[in-house]
């Protein structure tokens, strides 16, 4: 195995990765949304994000909802939150990116430029 491994990794012990599970054996899935808001619409966007927060936390039952603006890229925003199942991710992706996104009027390029990805956290042994 060392013959094909980069020299910086030779001698490092590897073990199989496994997904981080919640209590009860449920998989925790981290969702990232990314989009750029038109600079002239930034204040309107920030105002509607109060409603988005309420919808996501109270109605959609996501966990650990947060949103961020790029420090070196103003108007680039990322939302992060956790869901318990891929079905929740698919439902939210449809709701937030395809059906009637709450923010698409302010996104540069419209709803086609709202990107959403799901990740499972990995832990090593």
Image (spheres, rainbow, N blue to C red):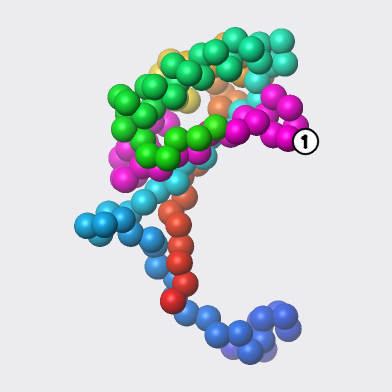
- Residue at 58% in and 17% down: 46
Image-quadrant location for residue 17: bottom left
- Residue at 33% in and 59% down: 21
Q: Which residues are magenta?
A: 68-95
- Residue at 61% in and 85% down: 12
Say above or below: 38 vs 75. above
Is residue 79 one of those drawn in magenta? yes
Say above or below: 73 vs 26. above
- Seen as rendered, the residue at the extreme right is 72
Q: Which residue is mark 1?
A: 72
Position of residue 102 measured from the top left corner of the image (x, y, whole percent): 47, 16
Position of residue 26 measured from the top left corner of the image (x, y, whole percent): 27, 54
Where is the N terminus found, in terms of image quarters? bottom right
Please indicate, yes or no, whether residue 95 appears anywhere in the rendered image. Answer: no
- Residue at 47% in and 25% down: 97
Image-quadrant location for residue 40: top right
């Amino acid at each position: 195995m060392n013959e094909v491994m980069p020299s910086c990794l030779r001698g490092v012990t590897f073990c199989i990765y496994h997904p981080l599970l919640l209590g009860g054996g449920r998989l925790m899935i981290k969702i990232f949304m990314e989009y750029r808001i038109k600079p002239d619409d930034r204040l309107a966007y920030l105002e509607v994000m109060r409603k988005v927060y309420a919808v996501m936390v109270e109605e959609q039952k996501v966990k650990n909802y947060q949103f961020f603006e790029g420090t070196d890229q103003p108007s680039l925003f990322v939302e992060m939150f956790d869901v318990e199942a891929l079905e929740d991710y698919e439902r939210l992706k449809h709701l937030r990116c395809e059906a009637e996104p709450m923010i698409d009027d302010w996104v540069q390029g419209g709803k086609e430029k709202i990107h959403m990805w799901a990740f499972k956290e990995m832990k090593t042994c």
